[in-house]
Amino acid sequence: MEEPPTRARHPHTHLPTSAEAAACAEVLVRHQHLHATVLTPSGQWRVQHRADSPVQLLYGPTAMVNLAAQIQHRIRAPRNHTR
């Protein structure tokens, strides 16, 4: 089943370019927050979160940048620690 497109928590003041999306994708893979990303000729991104997970389709640069923002938010969100 295909997941719905990602949405930003805060709307962009400009539309991200393909170069910005590619930079986000490269950093996410390099830091192992995603297993793989591939930009298709149609402008869609194929994203795999883990080697054994299904491929997710993202539609355009904005969706890739939004995914990067969601991952960044999840990483930086304070965690509740019980001691």
Image: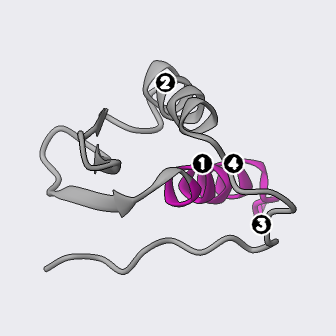
For disc 2, the marked residue is 26
What secondary structure is found at the residue carrying circle 3? loop
Q: Are marks 1 and 4 in contact (CB under 8 Å)?
A: yes
Residue drawn at the location 14% of the way across and 57% of the way down: 54
- Give the residue pinned by disc 3: 80
Which tag is nearer the camera, tag 2 or tag 3?
A: 2
Quadrant of the snapshot with the C terminus: bottom right
Task: Please report contact status of discs 4 and 3: CB closer than 8 Å, yes or no.
Answer: no
- x 54%, y 56%: residue: 67
Instruction: Give the mark, 3 or 1, whose residue is nearer the N terminus.
Output: 1
Q: Provide residue 44's location: percent of width, then percent of height.
A: 32, 52
- Along the line of sight, which residue is nearer the eye, 78 or 46? 46
Q: Position of residue 48 (x, y in %)?
A: 26, 46
Please name the residue that numbered disc 1 is placed on.
Answer: 68
Where the N terminus falls, by quadrant? bottom left
The answer to whether 37 appears left or right of 68 in the picture is left
Q: Secondary structure at mark 1?
A: helix
Which residues are drawn in magenta?
62-83
The answer to whether 24 is drawn above or below residue 31 in the figure is below
Query: Which residue of the protein is positioned furthest toward the front in this rendering?
Result: 42
